[in-house]
Image (cartoon, rainbow, N blue to C red):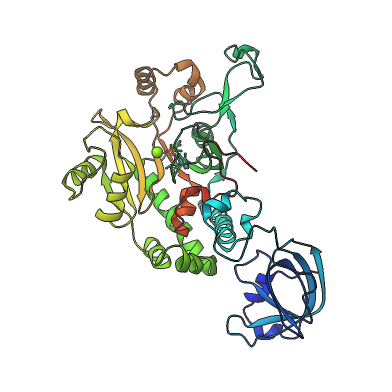
Amino acid sequence: MRTKIKEILHAPHPEKLIGKQVTVCGWVRTVRDQKTFAFIEVNDGSTLANLQVVAPSAGELTTGASLSVSGHLVASPGKNQALELKADSLKMLGACDATKYPLQKKRHSFEFLRTLAHLRPRTNTQGAVLRVRSALAFATHTFFQSRGFYYLHTPIITASDAEGSGEMFRVTTLEKNLDDASKDFFGKPTYLTVSGQLEGEIAACALSDVYTFGPTFRAENSNTSRHLAEFWMIEPEMAFADLDADRECAESYLRFCVQYVLDHCKEDLEFFDKFIENGLVARLQAVAAHSFAHLTYTQAIEILKKAPKQFEFPVAWGTDLQSEHERYIAEEYSKKPTIITDYPAAIKAFYMRENPDGKTVAAMDILVPKIGEIIGGSQREERLDVLERKLDALGLKREDYWWYLELREYGTVPHAGFGLGFERLVLFVTGMENIRDVIPFPRFPGHAEF
Ligand code: 4AD
Ligand code: MG
């Protein structure tokens, strides 16, 4: 049986493993061949650190080769690790031509590594990103399941524009005459979903509390470090809930995720703290420990107008907050995650609940330092007449949303939810700068390799 390197290097009592026979498999990171023996650093991705293997000779092993090694664990004289493996038998599984292997020992740029998506998970940074990503997915399920939410699977192919903003990828089997959708596979135009929210509302209006966690697609041509064409979103939806309940849930969820990685991904976070963002762990500890700031949109506009700073985009009530505005609020004004509520109706999606003032809606965005918007949500418009009026005003066809409207006809209830962009969460907890570097296979304009 194979032992994972993590079980050896993170054993609670390493001294108890001394003398133990183990078989370890992995990839060679470095080889130092001395006259009478060789040091081989092996990594199997189960953890950041490498296991040092001491063997009589490295044979044909070079950096990048895969191997299986059996032997017994001994106390390591080195100070970096408690144990090392003294090899009795060593087998190369797959050779690696060192003259061609693109992952040389030097530090490569993240941009260059993106062109090697089949090999980049073997780098320290990508390995750590993928482990933290996995932990955040588990934290997400743990949080919502412990609150009694049910995990809902919403469709990837859809005929409705959940955000009403027309940024959808068409899905078709037609090769010509794309305009005649009656001849298309589904008999109507279909698209990759931009959000599972509307279906989430259907389920919430039956099971009370649900969440989705799936891929979403947006054909917005934003070549930024915060946008992907394919990203993962978590969308909780709660029946019998208003905007305050929504805010509480979103803040608790974010802080839970941060605490979860602090508790479960210590080694990887320390790596990010050292090489990616100095002070990361302290920043995350502060997020987990303190409640978020809360401002209304109108207050945020006043703050931005008084800011001792020139913005590229003008600040005026009624216009959407730009990334620079969001970051000023979170980074310089509040200096912590900030919830902004009650945005003007005109800049938000059709489904958000109209406030009594008739001008604003019960919307909520959470802005965090370095990233800006990480969560967008709202209380939903549960009043049929108001919703119909809003669709009409936006030029959206009632018949396209007939089932969504019927939810309001048969036992409508106040309900609310939000969406968290999973990759933005990974950026937030790792300190990584570019969203393309926190998803294994990034999709963005012009790029769908691998
Ligand atoms: O604010 P958005 O567009 O809200 C919705 O989709 C709602 N249906 C959510 C809901 O209420 N159920 O998107 C939600 C979040 C954003 O805050 C952002 O974190 C992320 O999704 N996001 C993106 N992440 C990466 N690339 C993109 N192109 C993104 N667009 C949105
Ligand atoms: Mg948004």
Instruction: Name the one closer to the observer, 111 or 163.
Output: 111
Q: Is residue 92 above or below residue 75?
A: above
Image quadrant in which you'd find residue 188: top right
Depth order, front residue of 246/87: 87
Residue depicted at x 65% and y 63%? 45
Q: Quadrant of ligand 1?
A: top left
Residue 417 picture location, percent across and down: 43, 40
Name the residue rendered at 40%, 22% in the picture.
384
> On screen, 116 above or below 388?
below
| Quarter of the figure with the C terminus | top right
Residue 381 x, y percent position in the rendering: 38, 30
Q: Say which of 439 and 238 sits in front.
A: 439
Tell me: 72 left or right of 12: right
Q: In this view, does 440 lie to the left or right of 37?
A: left
State left or right for residue 74 relative to residue 12. right
- Quarter of the image with the N terminus in it: bottom right
Give the residue furthest to the front.
99
| Depth order, front residue of 51/141 | 51
